[in-house]
Amino acid sequence: MHQNNNWEPDHRNRNSNLYFPRGYGNRRRNSEDEFKSNGRDNYDFDWDQESNDSDDSDIDRPNGFVMNDFQNNVENEETDSTLNSTSVLSHEMQKERMEWQSFLSSVLTGEVIKSEKRRLSGSNSRQAANLSYQIWLGIRAITRGHTPAEEKLIVEERRKLIDKVLKEVIEFEVKPGDVSALDQVAGTLQRVDACENLYHTRKSMMIDKPLYKSHDFQYNLEALNSWLTITRSLQTQLKILQNWTGSETLEITRPKDAPADAENPSFLERILKENSLKQTFEKRTLATLNSLLLKAKCVMIENAAAFTKMKLPPYINELQQLLNFPTKLMEECMKLLLTYSNRPSEPTMLMVQQMMENLQISLSLACNIKHQYLEIIKPANGWDIPPSIDENYNTVLLDSLKCYFKLLQWKLKLGFKTVSFKEAEILENEWSFLSDICRHIVGGDSETAVQFW
């Protein structure tokens, strides 16, 4: 359908001539007949449509043009509104997504549970503390057969005596007398525990009793707890070893003047029958002994000044007994192995290999035990343990090393009878072991050099 160019909308001034053709004001009105005769082919009119305006309806406008332009404008407005709504919707979706991600993160990190706990316990910290105190007081009253009011009065009366106990800790010194230092320390700490039980939290006790959170009190309290804990641990460990050996002095072998008794073997004979030497030292009793001794050393060094001030006695007797036990056990085991190794005059290859394997395990364990012992007794501030290792310990190690070389020579001599013997490979394998242990034995390095020369 073709339109006249004079009726095209002016897009350059769309607002002013949106529905009217260009030059409309300069035209005269045409009659119905003129429109019928001249513009029938160019315009499509609906003459049967009646105008609603009696005054302005005599202007005959091309309905098709007006409607088409109005439809285009409506479509443009709808498109703009759709774009705006799409951008707004996209922004809303992004906002919802961010809120969902934040909620998921709070769930995964446990923030939801924490917030619910805070909500249930009350947003006010004072209310939460008061609720905790009421619960604690109610449980305490029920367990003691009192009402909450009666128990509150009892607690308040006992709290008046706390300052005396706190000053006792700050001024604590071991007093000479019939009561041992262990009992004095234990009694003082029990009274401190009784004072702490009068509060539902340590924080509330620090608020009510400022002396409780003072540096002097906390420093002495920590020192007393450390001393009591390590002393009881050493005594417990010593009791375990006494029960294991069946001797109060931790005797490992039978006395020299005692007759042999097959029904009542010595501790050394018993453990070697039950387990090998390596399995014996891998037992939990001996495995934890070294860590306990190292802990005792650290405690004495860290609290040296406090122990001296409070006149707390060092646990030297227990320490020396525990320190000597592994070396005594190892020394007697090495002596027994040396006795067995020197018996055969012409051993077989199988016997030589078995004795070498036993001596190799024993020498490794003996050197490791000696190294641990020397590390523990190194002097430091607050730690001065006199050496108590047996003087014959190093002699036994050196004799065992010489015996090992003798067995190695037997192995090399017996090896000539075999076809697959390779002397260089055997010596190379033995060198890695011997060069490692000889530095722990006094005179071991020179003995190793002479033997390999």
Image: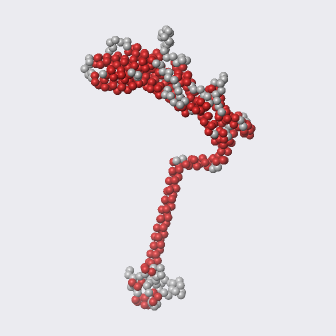
Image quadrant containing the C terminus: top left
- In this view of the protein, can residue 405 be seen by the observer? yes
Q: Nearer the viewer, residue 379 or 281?
A: 379
* Left or right: 413 as drawn, with respect to 289: left
Percent position of residue 30, x then y: 45, 90
The quadrant where residue 154 appears? top right
Question: Which residue is pictured at 37% across the width and 17% down the height?
Answer: 403
**Foreground: 217 or 328?**
217
**Above or below for 254 versus 364:** above
Q: Count numbered badges in the picture.
A: 0
Which corner quadrant of the image does residue 7 belong to?
Answer: bottom left
Give the percent coordinates (x, y) of residue 411. 31, 18
The residue that appears at 34% across and 27% down in the rendered structure is: 432
In the image, residue 275 above or below residue 27? above
Quarter that holds the N terminus:
bottom left
Tell me which residue sits at (56%, 49%) in the image: 112
Horizontal and vertical percent position of residue 214? 63, 39
Out of 330 and 76, give the one closest to the viewer. Answer: 330
Task: Write the residue at 47% across / 70% down.
Answer: 80
Colour mapping? secondary structure
Q: Position of residue 272 (x, y in %)?
A: 45, 18
Q: Is residue 359 visible?
A: no
